[in-house]
């Protein structure tokens, strides 16, 4: 933990804080040294969005990105990772888009258990506080999302193996 | 986004040796699933999986060694619950989630700086 804190945030960068705020909600906060209309623009303009959404350090690349960013509009994003042959698709719908203030979208690629993401932009003295909330439909949905990356993810793989071996 | 995180977490936290052995058995996987819903005594688990107490104790022993299950004896009853490995995995997932956003936001920071400079330059041009 200590080692991590030394290099995160990177020199000259603000800290990104994260909290599990309730049974079914994760909240990320980060301060940006610029006005809200600029930060918003970087989320709302697909060409700009592509430049920061897939961090290189995670080995991710954006293969395609379609965003109809308005209330009721939809998005579809495909990302590639060296570990997976097939591109990973992310898609959903914008529930609410208020320029320079707020964007709310669904994560339909996760089916019924997908979170609703709300990001707000609050400007103070030329700086912008970004608050991002992932609200899952239930405690179980969030627990499952977390667990799918761990031992129970293996449980699923073993079950699939059982099915294969039985066939 | 889940599978991005899952990928990171699986490689960073799972010690494959003991986990594999522990999870290669269908009963033990069933026990983990059951304990994910609620804590149970060994007696309850034995009944639920139609096993002898001794048989269930052996399975619990394997799971406990892998850190997947923790047991606690209260009075004459030994209660089983999900083990410390699960907690460590949960922490790892949450940390991976935060790191993903921190990486994104550091990149966004650079872009915001660039756009700010551009706006300033454009403003100067308009005034000129």
Image: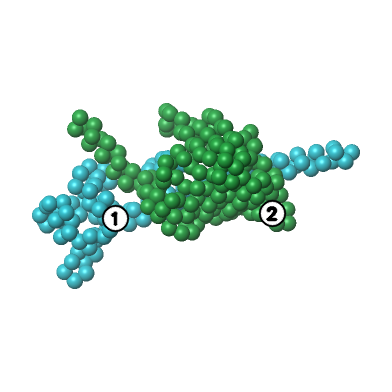
Q: Chain of mark 1?
A: B
Helix, strand or loop status at disc 2: strand
Count residues near mark 1 (Cα–Cα under 10 Å), then give few for <14, some for 14-19, many for 20+: few
Expressed as whole percent of the image width and height from the top left, the position of residue A119 reads: 58, 49
Q: Residue at x 43, y 41 (%)?
A: A110
The residue beneath circle 2 is: A123
The residues tagged by marks 2 and 1 sit, at their Cα atoms, a distance apart of: 44 Å
Front residue (pair B48, A49): B48
Q: Give the green chain's letter.
A: A
* Cβ atoms at labels 2 and 1 below 8 Å apart: no
- The extreme right residue here reads B128
Expressed as whole percent of the image width and height from the top left, the position of residue B123 reads: 82, 41
Q: Residue at x 18, y 66 (%)?
A: B77
Q: Give the cyan chain's letter.
A: B
Expressed as whole percent of the image width and height from the top left, the position of residue A62 reads: 54, 32
Q: Quarter-wise, where is residue A114 in the image?
A: top left
The residue beneath circle 1 is: B37
| Viewer can see residue A16 | no
- The extreme front residue here reads A72
Q: Residue at x 61, y 51 (%)?
A: A120
Front residue (pair B53, A21): A21
Q: Chain of mark 2?
A: A
Question: Are dots 2 and 1 on a single chain?
Answer: no
Quadrant (top left, top right, bottom left, bottom right) of the C terminus of chain A: top left
Q: Is residue B67 left or right of residue A167?
A: right
Q: Residue at x 17, y 59 (%)?
A: B44
Q: Which disc number belongs to residue B103?
A: none
Q: Quarter-wise, where is residue B40 in the image?
A: bottom left
Q: How is the image coloured?
A: by chain
């Amino acid at each position: 933990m200590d080692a991590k804190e030394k290099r995160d945030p990177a020199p000259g960068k603000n800290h990104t804080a994260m909290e599990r705020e309730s049974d079914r909600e994760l909240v990320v906060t980060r301060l940006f040294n610029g006005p809200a209309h600029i930060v918003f623009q970087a989320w709302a303009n697909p060409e700009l969005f592509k430049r920061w959404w897939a961090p290189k350090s995670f080995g991710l690349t954006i293969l395609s990105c379609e965003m109809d960013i308005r209330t009721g509009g939809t998005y579809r994003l495909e990302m590639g990772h060296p570990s997976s042959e097939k591109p990973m698709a992310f898609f959903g719908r914008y529930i609410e888009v208020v320029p320079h203030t707020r964007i709310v979208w669904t994560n339909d690629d996760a089916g019924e258990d997908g979170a609703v993401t709300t990001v707000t932009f609050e400007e103070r003295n030329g700086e912008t506080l970004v608050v991002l909330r992932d609200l899952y439909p239930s405690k179980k949905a969030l627990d499952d999302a977390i667990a799918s990356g761990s031992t129970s993810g293996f449980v699923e793989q073993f079950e699939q193996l059982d099915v294969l071996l039985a066939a | 986004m889940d599978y991005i995180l899952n990928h990171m977490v699986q490689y960073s936290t799972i010690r494959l040796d003991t986990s594999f052995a522990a999870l290669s058995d269908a009963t033990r996987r069933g026990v983990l699933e059951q304990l994910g819903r609620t804590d149970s005594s060994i007696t309850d688990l034995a009944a639920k999986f139609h096993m002898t107490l001794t048989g269930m104790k052996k399975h619990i022993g394997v799971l406990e060694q892998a850190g997947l299950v923790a047991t606690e004896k209260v009075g004459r009853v030994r209660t089983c619950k999900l083990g410390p490995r699960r907690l460590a995995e949960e922490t790892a997932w949450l940390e991976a989630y935060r790191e993903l956003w921190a990486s994104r936001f550091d990149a966004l920071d650079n872009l915001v700086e660039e756009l700010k400079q551009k706006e300033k330059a454009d403003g100067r041009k308009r005034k000129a």
